Amino acid sequence: MDTAAQPGGPARPDPAATTAHPRVTGTRRLVAAGFLLPALVLLGALVVYPIGYSVQRSFFDRSGEGFAGLDNYTEIFTDDRILTAVQNNAIWVLLAPTVATALGLIFAVLTERVRWGTAFKLIVFMPMAISMLAAGIIFRLVYEQDPDRGVANAVWVGVHDTFAEASVFPRAHPLPVHPLEKADGGAFLTKEPVRAGSPASLPLVGVAPGQMPEDAEPARAARPEEGRITGTAWLDFTRGGGGTVNTVDSRELGLKGITVEAVRDGSVVATARAGADGTFSLPASADGALLRLPAENFRAQYNGVDWLGPSLVTPAIIGSYVWMWAGFAMVLIAAGLASVPRELLEAARIDGANEWQVFRRVTVPLLAPVLAVVLVTLMINVLKIFDLVYIIAPGSAQDDANVLALQLYRSSFGTDADLGVGSAIAVLLLVLVLPVMFFNIRRMRREARR
C-alpha cells in the first residue's frame, strides 16, 4: 500500500487505496447474495409460502370462500377424534423418544468392550434401512391375533401355555342321544348314576380328528373292575363314516387327559383322568354318583393378546417405532461415547466407584449433550409420525391410535374433506414443533460458544 510520509508524523494511507475497500466489500456481498438466492427462493417456495398459506387457509371454511374465524381451531379442541389424536401425540412424545434413547444408551455402553460389538450395532441399526411403510407391514403381521400367523402372540401363547395348560377339547359336546346333558358353567353331567361293575360311556363330538392330541390312541371299551367305577371317554366320530352311536369303535380316538369327576349331592367325591385310549377308573366311593366332565375340559384355547385392540394399539405401534429408531440413537451415542476421556473413567474406578456409579455419575453426564441431540431429534420426528399408525392400526382401532399427522391426512383428503380443519391441524403441529426447535437451536448456540 502506498503511503505519504510527512516530517514528524506517521505515514498516511493512500486515498485511492482507502476508497477501494467499499467496492471489494460490496462485491463480496453481491457474490454471497448470488449464492444464497437459489436457497432463499427454494426456502420461500417450499417452506415459507406453504406455512403462510396454511395459516391463512385455517381461518376459512370447508369451501375456502367463507371466513370462519377461529371456528376451525375451536373444532380441534372439541372434536373427540382430534382430542384423541392430541392425547396420543403426547404419549408418543413422552414415551417413544425416551425409550429409544434409553435403549440406544444401553446398547452403546454394553457393546463398547465386547469383540462382536460392531456386528451387534450393525444388526440393531439395520431397521433404519427399512422404510416406514415396510416396517408397518412387517409389524402388522407380527401383531396378528392368530398365534399361527402373528409372532408376538405365538411367543406369548407359548409362554402362557407353559404355565397354564390349555384344553384340547374347547368345542367338544355330546349329542342328544348321548348319555350326557349340559350342566351349569359349561360342564356335562351323566343322565343316570353310575354303578360299580357297569362301565360308563362318555361319548363326545365336536373335535376335529386333526386337533386331537398326537399321542391319542384308538378308544377301548373299559373292562369291569370289582369295587371300582370304570368307563371310556372318547370321540364318537368315525372318519370316513360308519360306526355306531354310543358304541366304542376301533377307528375312534380316546379323549386323552380329559378330567372325569364323580359328584354326589353337589360335592366331588372322586376324580380321574382318561388315558390315551380314553379309559378311566374311579374308586368305590363313586358308586351311585353322577359323572361330570368339568368345564375346564372345554375351556377355549388361549389366543394371546389383542395387540391391535383399542387399549394396546398405541403402545404396540410405539414398539415398532422403537425397533426402527433405537439403532439410530445407539450409533449417535456410541460416537459420543468414543470421545469420552478414558482417564476420567479410570480415575473414577481407581477412587472405588463400581461400574454402575461410573455409568451414572461420569458417563451419563459427559454424554448429556449427545443424549439431548438424540432426544430432541426423536421428539421432532414422532410429532410427524404417520406411516406406522396408518399401516399398522386396523380400521376398527384407527380412531384409538389416531395421531395429529394422520388426522391431518384424514381431514384434508377424501369425500368428507375439510381443508379448513386440516390447515388448522397443520398449524397446531407447527406450533408444537417450534418450542422443540428453539430449544435445539439454543443448545447448539451454547455448544458453539464453548
Image (cartoon, grey):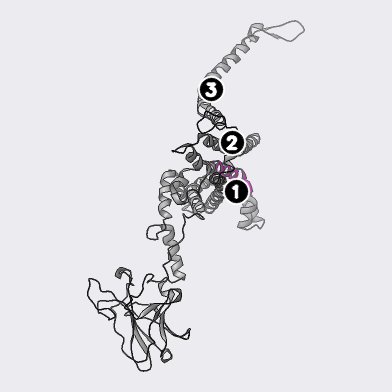
The amino acid type, in three-letter code, at marker 2 is: Asp
- Indicate which label's residue lies in the foreground, 2 or 1: 2
Please tell me how crowded label 2 is: few (under 14), some (14-19), or many (20+) other residues with Cα within 10 Å: some
Q: Image point 57% across, 40% down: which residue?
A: 75
Residue beneath disc 2: 71
The amino acid type, in three-letter code, at marker 3 is: Leu
Near-viewer residue (173 or 138): 173
Quarter-of-image position of residue 170: bottom left
Residue 264 location in percent, x, y?
A: 45, 86
Residue 431 location in percent, x, y?
A: 60, 37
User: Which residues lie in the magenta part?
Assistant: 364-380
Dominant secondary structure of the residues highlighted in magenta in the image: helix
Residue beneath disc 3: 36
Instruction: Decide: is 273 above or below 428.
Output: below
Distance in Å between CA atoms under marks 3 and 2: 40 Å
Is any part of residue 396 visible from this angle? yes
Distance in Å between CA atoms under marks 3 and 1: 43 Å
Q: Are marks 2 and 1 in contact (CB under 8 Å)?
A: no
Q: Earlier in the sequence, mark 2 or mark 1?
A: 2
Residue beneath disc 1: 342
Disc 1 is placed on an element classified as helix
Instruction: Determine whether, in the image, residue 435 is placed left or right of residue 262.
Output: right
Residue 141 location in percent, x, y?
A: 40, 53
Q: Quadrant of the N terminus?
A: top right
Distance in Å between CA atoms under marks 2 and 1: 59 Å
Disc 2 is placed on an element classified as helix
